[in-house]
Image (cartoon, grey):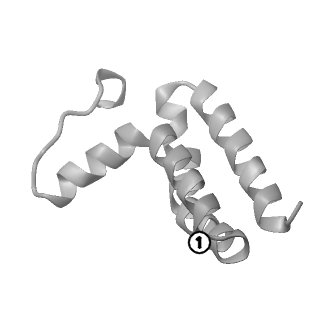
Amino acid sequence: MSLPLILGCFWVLAAAVTALLPMRRQMLPGTMLLLAAPVLLVWIGAVHGWVWLALGLAAFASMFRNPLIYLWKRARGQTPELPPELRS
């Protein structure tokens, strides 16, 4: 197995562990995973082709759908509601 796929497996495990944390504790590791994902996906796509890139992108979008929806709404100028656990 290639290095990008091994790192992708570790990324998935880290995302699963992060999802088990309480909502307030998910912010920092979740942000780091969100920033690392595009780099890792491009690397996987460059080494293994667009099919694996598409599969990885689908998995990423599935795991991070709520943060991505929130960021999309913020980018469009809307003010989406935060979950009650994150309101201060």
**Does residue 68 sit above or below 45 in this rendering?**
above
Left or right of residue 69: residue 45: right
The one nearer the camera, 45 or 19, is 45
Q: Position of residue 6 (x, y in %)?
A: 82, 56
Q: Position of residue 74 (x, y in %)?
A: 20, 53
Q: Which residue: 13% across, 58% down? A: 76
Q: Residues within 10 Å of mark 1 (few under 14, many from 20)?
A: some
Q: Which residue: 58% across, 30% down? A: 19
Q: Secondary structure at mark 1?
A: helix
Quarter of the image with the C terminus in it: top left
Left or right of residue 48: residue 55: left
Q: Position of residue 67 (x, y in %)?
A: 37, 43
Rendering quarter of residue 21: top right
Residue flagged by tag 1: what amino acid is it? Val
Q: Which residue: 86% across, 66% down? A: 2
Rendering quarter of residue 13: top right
**Does residue 81 sit above or below 56 in this rendering?**
above
Q: Which residue is mark 1?
A: 42
Question: Farthest residue in the bottom direction?
Answer: 46
Rendering quarter of residue 20: top right
Left or right of residue 52: residue 73: left
Quarter of the image with the N terminus in it: bottom right
Q: Position of residue 35 (x, y in %)?
A: 52, 62
